[in-house]
Image (cartoon, rainbow, N blue to C red):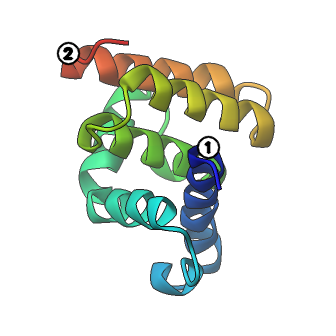
Amino acid sequence: MRRSDQRKEAVFALYQRDVTERELADVLEGAKPFTRELAEGADAHLDAIDAEISSLSKGWTIDRMAPLDRAVLRIALFELHHSVAVPAEIAIDEAVGLAAEFCGADAPGFVNGILGAAAREAGVAT
């Protein structure tokens, strides 16, 4: 299974956890290693990631965002800050692609804006 597919599965795992309130471990049962790494990593850093999303999203609170948009941002920010194997531009491009495919019409621009700002603040080349 390609990393892109596993990234999508990680996004949907976080989404399912948020909307069903099931345990992440249950949602990830049988998941591939990269899917687990992303979802569990994002979950482990959830408070810091959500604080960053909140600080970068002008006029939006984390609770007002669509759950799927939040999940896309959480996985991408985890990759951006904690994955040395994934270049920033790949993490951002994949997240924007997922937002374009599965989220609302405004989501790709919103996701790109948040992640671009996060990359600039972190001094990460995109």
Instruction: Examine the image and state in which quarter residue 16 appears.
Output: bottom right
Camera-side mark, 2 or 1: 1
Position in image of residue 28 (x %, y %): 54, 77
Question: What residue sits 56% from the left and 50% below the top?
Answer: 7
Depth check: give the residue in front, 99 or 34.
34
Report the amino acid beneath label 1.
Ser
Give the quadrant of the C terminus. top left
Instruction: Examine the image and state in which quarter residue 27 appears.
Output: bottom right
Question: What residue sits 37% from the left and 41% below the top?
Answer: 79
Report the amino acid beneath label 2.
Gly
Position in image of residue 15 (x %, y %): 61, 62
Q: Which residue is mark 2?
A: 123
> Viewed as shown, does residue 32 lie left or right of 114?
right
Q: Which residue is mark 1?
A: 4
Question: What residue sits 56% from the left and 69% below the top?
Answer: 18
Instruction: Examine the image and state in which quarter residue 6 appears.
Output: bottom right
Depth check: give the residue in front, 44 or 87.
87
> Is residue 28 among what the camera can see?
yes
Q: Secondary structure at mark 2?
A: loop
| Precedes in sequence: disc 2 or disc 1 | 1
